Structure formats: structure tokens, C-alpha cells
Amino acid sequence: MSTAVKSYAAVDLGASSGRVMAGRVGPDSLELSEAHRFPNRPVRVPEGLRWDVLGLYSGVLDGLRAAGQVDSVGIDSWAVDHGLLDADGALLGNPVHYRDARTAGVAEKVWATVPAAELYAATGLQYAPFNTLYQLAAARSTAQFAQARRLLLIPDLLTYWLTGEQGTELTNASTTQLIDPRTRDWSYAVAARLDVDLELFAPLRRPGDPAGLLRPDVLEETGLTGPVPVTTVGSHDTASAVAAVPASGERFAYICTGTWSLAGLELTAPVLSEESRAANFTNELGLDGTVRYLRNIMGLWLLQECVRAWGDPDLGPLLREASLVPALRSVVDAGDAAFLAPGRMPQRIAEACRVSGQPVPGTRAELTRCILDSLALAHRRAVEDAQRLAGHPVDVVHVVGGGTRNALLCQLTADACGLPVVAGPTEAAALGNVLVQARAHGLVGDLADARRLLVATQPLTRYEPRGDTARWREAEGRLATR
């Protein structure tokens, strides 16, 4: 193992903002600082909701310039969305946003050819209306798709622009609903039955694989001195975040918090049972042959949309006021697709409480408490269901990502689960990104070694559960009977 200290740029793109983080890694050191942060605002145009991918790429270039000279660059982002390229390698329009309405009703059409149960048994992927497979089915009849000769997932698209090299990173590919989690390769049978041409995808890459060198014009734009390699990381941000869970052993659950909450277990094999499908758990691929067995929960999107509707008030006082509101007065199903679209979130949550016969939150603090109680309840259900379905008991819940800054949510999650919660690191996806790059340079060993380094270097906060879980079971029962 190398004894040198090296510098890395982690490009970490979330659904509401992007950032370039500068990491320095040595055998016993791991430091991370923010080089540049920039907004990620979707744009509604006449044809629907789109990502401003050129704005994102500009932010990446600005971030690399701010990070300074580095030994490698890695890119991770949200899943499922992609750009289509023509025969010359040019982008065919802005990538479609996963919250766009074009996939409404498409899943049912796909299931007419491959029933949902068969699709899950083959790919292990949960139902979400925006899975890449359904996006492809929705796009099939368009002129743009007819011109497409290549599909690149968002991190792979940006990597292509930086290097001129094309590839499809495996952890992100596992969210397309076209990967077999047992073979960790394409599900050729599913693709054939649904007439999906897998030649549309670039060859698969795995975390740690080289992804090319920054092109001369990129070096000029960023002021970097070449050669600067780009390293394939766990390019699905959740894969990178789970790699940065500071766990020891195997008896842990994780919750990656942010716009979404991804709650589940790290396993060595997928769970493909019909019961697992009915519970809407997904089997996505992680580092070192692992499977991310998890459930997608709407997450802090609910609070983010309310705060936006309220004119972006200071979150600190709002959370303090919410902590004084009686617990579990009103709860909603945080996974309900009714909350997926942007806009009017306070009214929609209030209406859900009214329709279900619960007290309607009358203040911002009451609405915030309703959201956080509902998220903690969803975390509890996911952690309990995952243990039961996988036969994999846990002793602790690790919370990573932006939600670690929300002490009330972390404490409520400990209370709901009846398990200690260890919160941190906040920039888990960027740290996982950096650690994969460091592994490629021999600075870090296996996943367990990387996690020991995280425990030794990153600030963590422990929350012990308060009281028993009876009131959470009662609230869960309220939701179940609606």
C-alpha cells in the first residue's frame, strides 16, 4: 500500500445541487473540502421537465478549476436519467427529468409483455415509474430516439465530455432495470423480450476502472496540468454513499438521506422473492460484489418543497419549533407517489391528513413535525422489513448524507427503529467517490479498510433511542388501515 498523500476531485451531483469536493488521502488521513457548489435546477419547457445538463457541466469545469491540481477525478450523480447521442456523438437535447410525466402508465404496458413478477425475478429492481426501462419505452416512438445511437447515464455523459471515452458504470446501470444482479451483467433475456437494443449502451465499467484522461481543451479550460486521469467510481451517488458508511461488521442498516431516503442493508446476494417485490425493495449493485438491498422513500424532498413554498425561511428555528410539537399527531405515507411532483407540497400534505381523518397541521412547525415523524416512520418500516425479508438482523442504523444535519430527524429515527443511530458523514457520496479513487492508487485496501479510515477521521454523532416503540407501532397501524 502506498504511503504517499494524493489529491482527488469528487464531482457529486444531487437532484438539487452539484458540488466538486477536493479530497486528500494518505494511509492514515482523509480530508475533504468543498471546492465549488452550484445549483441544479430543472427547467420546464413546452415538451416537459428537463435537466440543464450544460449548466451542470459548466459547474463541473468551474469546480475542477477551483479544486486545483489533482491526481484523479471521479463523478457520481443521481440514477436512471440519461442523455441520448447521435451517430456523431452529439447530445440529442437536454436529458429528461425523472419527475417528468412521460412515463405515466408506461409500466403497465411493459408488464403486458414481461409481467411485473417476472421482471423483478430477473432484475431485482423495485417498481418506480421513472426507471430507465420505462423511460426507454416512453421514448421509443419519438424522433429523438430514432436518431439515438448511444445512451449514457448522467455521470457517464459528463465523463465522456471530459475524456472523449464512453462507458456505462455498473452500480448506476443496475438502476436501469436491465441488469441481472446475480451475474452483475446485462439481463439479455429481459432486453430481448422488450426489444431493447443493448448496443445502445456503452461497455460496462466497474468502480476503480480507468475512464480516460482529461481532454486537452478541458485542461486548458480548468488550468490543470495533464495527464489527469478520470477514475470510474460508484457513479450512482447512493453506491458511493453506502461505500462511505462507517460500519464495522455486517449487522448494520443504512439510511442515505437527502432529497430521497434510501434505507436498507448491504448484502452479498440479491433477495428476489415475490414477498420482496410486494414490499417494493430494490437490489442495486454496490462495491466489492455487494448488493444494496433498499427501499426508496420520498425523503427530505417533502420538507424541501415546503420550505421553498414558504419562501426559504431559516431551517434552524423551524426545526426547534417542530421539536416542541407533540409527536405523531399526524403522519402521512412518505412513499406515496402523490408527493412525487413539485409544487403545493404544504397543501398536499395537509389534504392527506384531512382525508385520513387526522388533525390537519395548522402551522409551519406542525407541518414540519408531520413530515419528520412520517419520514422516521418510513425509516422504521424499511429497516424492519429489510431485516425480515433478507433474514439479516442489525444492531445499529447508520444515517449518512445531508439528513445528518437534521438532529431531530436522526433522533426520531432512533426512537422509531428502537436502535441506536450513528449519524455521519454528511458528505458520504463525495467521500465514497474519493475513497474509490484512492483505492485505484493503492492508498486504501478493501471496503473494510476504507471504513476503518472513515471511523478514524470523520466526525460521527450517536443517538440512542428514547422510550419504547409502541407509539410508533400505533402510528404505523393508522397508516396501514387507510
Image (cartoon, grey):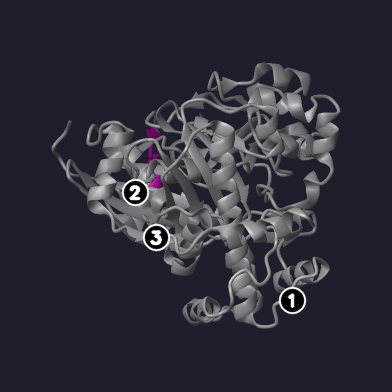
Return the residue nearer the eye: 29 or 278. Answer: 278
Instruction: Indicate which label's residue lies in the foreground, 1 or 3.
Output: 3
Query: Quarter of the image containing the C terminus?
Result: bottom right
Q: Quadrant of the N terminus?
A: top left
Q: Give percent across and percent down for residue 441.
A: 25, 33
Choose the circle earlier in sequence order: 1 or 3.
Answer: 1
The label on residue 464 is 3
Boundaries of the magenta span:
212-218
The amino acid marked with disc number 3 is Glu
Q: In which quarter of the image is residue 351?
A: bottom right
Q: Can residue 221 be seen in this view?
A: no
Give the camera-side residue of 459 and 75. Answer: 459
Question: Gap between marks 1 and 2, in whole Å?
Answer: 46 Å
* Closer to us: 357 or 260: 357
Residue found 67% across the figure and 29% down from its top: 149
Task: Determine which residue is flagged by label 2.
Answer: 9
The amino acid pointed to by label 1 is Val
Left or right: residue 451 compared with residue 154: left
In percent of width and height, residue 370 lies at: 63, 70
Q: How crowded is mark 1: few (under 14 residues within 10 Å), some or many (20 or more)?
A: many
Mark 1, residue position: 360
For residue 286, which numbered disc appears in the image? none
